[in-house]
Amino acid sequence: MPKFRFVKRKSLQKKDDPGKWYASPIVENRLNTGTVCRVVTRNTTTAPTELESGFNLVCDAIPLQLQLGNSVQLGKLGILRLSFGSSGVDNIDAFNAATMIRNVKVIFTPSKELMSAIKDGLSFENAGVVDNGFVYATTRAFKEAQGGGGSGDSGGGSGSGGGIIDPDPLG
C-alpha cells in the first residue's frame, strides 16, 4: 500500500499565506532490474537473465530512436518520447538549435491499461507529518506536539480506492 506524509507548502505568489498541507508520496524501496526480472518471471518458463537481456536490448535501442525523432511504444507499459524547451527569438533566422534548445528530457506516458491496473483497488496509508524538517510518525503525534491534542486524523483524502489509514491508530 503506498504511503504518504503531510507536508506544508506555501504559495510563492502569496508570501503571507501560511500554506496548505499536501500529501507527499513515500517510496518504500527501489527495485533493481534483477529483482524485477525475478519477480516477473517467478511463475514462467522464462529465466530472469533472459528477461534482463531483453530489457538491456530495448534500452540500447531507445536512445537512437528518440534521437531520430520517434516515440517508442513499450508494449502495455506506455510510450517514451523526447521533450525540450527553448529560448525565444524575435526573428526565426536568429534561432540556433545547438545553443538555444535546452532542458531535453524523456517523457514516459503510461498506457491506459497500465494506469487502470494500478488504480484498481488502490488505497493510501498516512505515514505521518513532516513539519520544519521533523517527521512525526502519525497525525495524532503532530497534533499533540502542536498542543492541539490527538483526537483523530483530519483532512486528506485518497485516490480512487480508499481512505486514510493511520498506521498506528493508538498514537
Image (tube, rainbow, N blue to C red):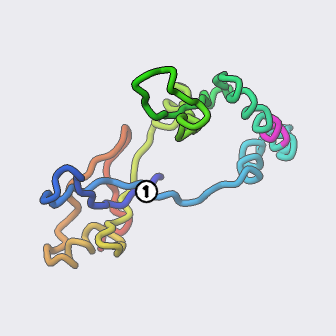
- In this view, the residue in front, 138 or 132, is 132
Q: Secondary structure at mark 1?
A: strand
Position above or below: 140 against 153: below
**Residue drawn at x 53%, y 39% as measured from the top left:** 102
x%, y% of residue 128? 34, 66
Q: Is residue 167 magenta?
A: no
Query: Magenta region: which residues?
Result: 53-57
- The three-letter amino acid code for the residue at tag 1 is Lys
Q: Is residue 56 magenta?
A: yes
x%, y% of residue 144? 20, 77
**Residue drawn at x 80%, y 37% as measured from the top left:** 60
Instruction: Tell me the quarter of the picture where residue 141 sits.
Output: bottom left
Quadrant, the C terminus: bottom left
- In this view, the residue in front, 24 or 121, is 24
x%, y% of residue 130? 33, 68
- Secondary structure mostly taken by the magenta-highlighted segment of the chain: helix
Position above or below: 98 against 139: above
**Residue drawn at x 34%, y 75% as measured from the top left:** 134
Q: How many numbered badges does the structure rendering display?
A: 1
Decide if residue 127 is on the left or right side of residue 20: right
Position above or below: 18 against 82: below
x%, y% of residue 53? 85, 41
Circle 1: is it few (<14), some (14-19), or many (20+) Cα within 10 Å?
Answer: some
Instruction: Tell me the quarter of the picture where residue 18 sits.
Output: bottom left
The residue wearing badge 1 is 3
Decide if residue 69 is on the left or right side of residue 7: right
Position above or below: 129 against 39: below
